[in-house]
Image: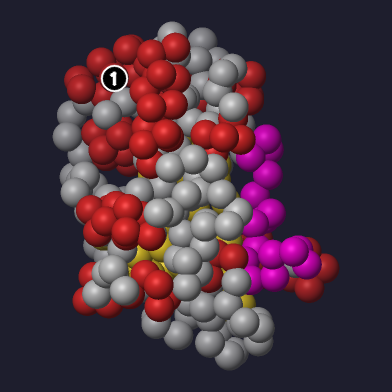
């Protein structure tokens, strides 16, 4: 069943998501708490599924994340740590189980204004599912995998927050996205499913149903914050030009009803080790009660 839903159509996945939310004991509480939150300065438009902020009030905290990230990159043996099955993007710089409440990553990921923005968009307080540091470089091969248009499979929606660690231009392999409303049209027109045969789409096929005028490039200076619903929005990235690279910190927020968290999300929540009795209700929900 889990595999069927993971690879199903929009309609099948929506039905599964609604049923899973009904079965999730904390979902009503998560919805109530989200509705009571004060509106964040960050607003993610539900029609488009994304928002970017080149300037914001979290400069000091984001600077901590950038400094920590650059220190990790400078001390890493990139050639040794590069995964042969994923040569374009580095995913294993951050070990979630070793992060604490003092980590810049956790402080940013749990900041009240970040969580309010994500919760208002998703309609409930989510679970913090991942904190990562991604390093993309040029690889002279045909485009493949995440370099092609796709929508993430975990749920009908989610939010990934991308923090630009490096300056990202059109040559550095920025994310290229299609807004959520246009992406839905493309999925219907292409009979898109999240399975292995229809997961990645070539540019030409997408452009038959969506003008390139609708493509949005998430470039920007270091410190830029980009919120993106990667389940609802077609996107690709890491088309890095020769001698260029891209470094981003990535934070993912999922519903407890997500395919890879149900049925017992409390057992698999990646940050459950951060749970303690002194946390407020929002942070307890965020790490997986």
Q: Which residue lies furthest to the bottom in this view?
A: 242
Structural crowding at the residue carrying mark 1, measured as other residues with C-alpha within 10 Å and reported as few (<14), some (14–19) or many (≥20) = some
Q: How many labels does the image show?
A: 1
Q: Is residue 251 left or right of residue 178?
A: right
Q: Which residue is drawn at 50% across and 15% down?
A: 289
Residue 127 x %, y %: 46, 29
The secondary structure that most of the magenta stretch takes on is loop
Q: Which residue occupies the foreground of this view, 186 or 283?
A: 186
Query: Is residue 286 in view?
Result: no
Please tell me whether residue 71 is drawn above or below residue 266 in the rendered image: below
Residue 208 x %, y %: 31, 74
Report the coloring of the rendering. Answer: secondary structure
Q: Is residue 238 left or right of residue 99?
A: left
Q: What element carries label 1?
A: helix
Q: Residue at x 74, y 64 (%)?
A: 85
The residue that disc 1 covers is 31
Please tell me whether residue 90 belongs to the stretch shown in magenta. Answer: yes
Q: Which residue occupies the foreground of this view, 72 or 86?
A: 86
Residue 50 sits in which quadrant?
Answer: bottom left
Residue 78 x %, y %: 74, 70
Q: Which residue is drawn at 24% across and 33% down?
A: 120
Which span of residues is magenta-colored? 83-98
Please tell me whether residue 209 is drawn above or below residue 20 in the rendered image: below
Q: Is residue 23 left or right of residue 214?
A: right
Please tell me whether residue 119 belongs to the stretch shown in magenta. Answer: no
Residue 84 x %, y %: 78, 67
Q: Residue furthest right?
A: 80
Q: Which residue occupies the foreground of this view, 171 or 164?
A: 171
Q: Which residue is drawn at 63% across and 25% down?
A: 268
Query: Is residue 262 in view?
Result: yes
> Which quadrant of the figure contains the N terminus?
top right
Q: Which residue occupies the foreground of this view, 34 or 234?
A: 234
């Amino acid at each position: 069943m889990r595999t069927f839903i993971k690879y199903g159509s929009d309609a099948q996945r929506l039905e599964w998501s609604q049923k899973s939310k009904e079965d999730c004991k904390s979902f009503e509480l998560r919805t109530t708490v989200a509705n009571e939150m004060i509106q964040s300065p960050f607003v993610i438009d539900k029609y488009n599924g994304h928002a970017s902020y080149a300037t914001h009030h979290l400069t000091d905290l984001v600077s901590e994340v950038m400094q920590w990230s650059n220190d990790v990159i400078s001390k890493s043996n990139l050639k040794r740590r590069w995964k042969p099955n994923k040569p374009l993007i580095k995913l294993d710089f951050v070990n979630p189980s070793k992060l604490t409440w003092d980590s810049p990553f956790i402080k940013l990921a749990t900041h009240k204004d970040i969580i309010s923005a994500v919760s208002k968009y998703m309609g409930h307080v989510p679970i913090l599912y991942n904190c990562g540091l991604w390093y993309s470089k040029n690889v002279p091969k045909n485009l493949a995998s995440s370099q092609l248009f796709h929508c993430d499979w975990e749920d009908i929606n989610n939010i990934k927050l991308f923090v630009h660690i490096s300056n990202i231009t059109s040559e550095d392999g920025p994310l290229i996205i299609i807004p959520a409303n246009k992406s839905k049209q493309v999925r219907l027109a292409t009979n898109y499913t999240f399975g292995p045969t229809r997961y990645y789409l070539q540019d030409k096929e997408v452009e038959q149903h969506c003008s390139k005028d609708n493509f949005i490039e998430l470039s920007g200076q270091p410190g830029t914050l980009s919120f993106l619903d990667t389940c609802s929005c077609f996107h690709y990235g890491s088309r890095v030009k020769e001698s260029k690279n891209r470094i981003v910190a990535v934070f993912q927020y999922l519903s407890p009803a997500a395919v890879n968290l149900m049925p017992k999300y409390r057992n698999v929540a990646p940050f459950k080790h951060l749970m303690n009795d002194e946390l407020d209700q929002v942070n307890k929900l965020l790490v997986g009660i």
